[in-house]
Amino acid sequence: MWLPGALGYRDVRSELNIAIVRSFRARGIEIPFPQRDLPVRSGLAPLGSAAGGAGA
């Protein structure tokens, strides 16, 4: 999109983004966002599950 000057750039950009979002929603289009999960482990096995643990 070409604008003759910098004035009104933010308004035009906002209106364009809103129109895109509305159009996508009307058509059931979703854009996934990246999600990164980091599992945190203690490094210790639960009792009875380690080799040579209780009951062995």
Image (spheres, rainbow, N blue to C red):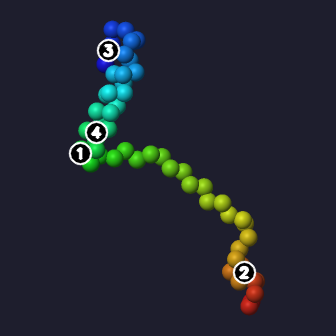
Q: Earlier in the sequence, mark 1 or mark 3?
A: 3
- Identify residue for label 4: 22
Q: Earlier in the sequence, mark 2 or mark 1?
A: 1
CB within 8 Å, label 3 to label 2: no
Residue 44 as seen in the image, left or right of residue 32: right
Q: Nearer the viewer, residue 30 or 16?
A: 16
Secondary structure at badge 3 equals: loop
In percent of width and height, residue 40 lies at 66, 60
Secondary structure at badge 2 equals: loop
Q: Nearer the viewer, mark 3 or mark 4?
A: 4
Q: Earlier in the sequence, mark 3 or mark 4?
A: 3
Measure the alpha-carbon separation of dots 1 and 3.
27 Å
Residue 6 as seen in the image, left or right of residue 36: left
Measure the alpha-carbon separation of dots 1 and 4.
9 Å
Secondary structure at badge 1 equals: loop
* Residue at image point 34% right, 47% down: 30
Instruction: Return the mark for residue 27.
Output: 1
Amino acid identity at mark 4: Arg
- Identify residue for label 2: 47
Q: Earlier in the sequence, mark 4 or mark 2?
A: 4
> Dot 4: few (<14), some (14–19), or many (≥20) neighbours within 10 Å?
few
Which corner quadrant of the image does residue 52 belong to?
bottom right
Q: Earlier in the sequence, mark 3 or mark 2?
A: 3
CB within 8 Å, label 1 to label 3: no
CB within 8 Å, label 3 to label 4: no
Amino acid identity at mark 3: Trp
Q: Earlier in the sequence, mark 1 or mark 4?
A: 4
- Identify residue for label 3: 2
In percent of width and height, residue 11 lies at 36, 22
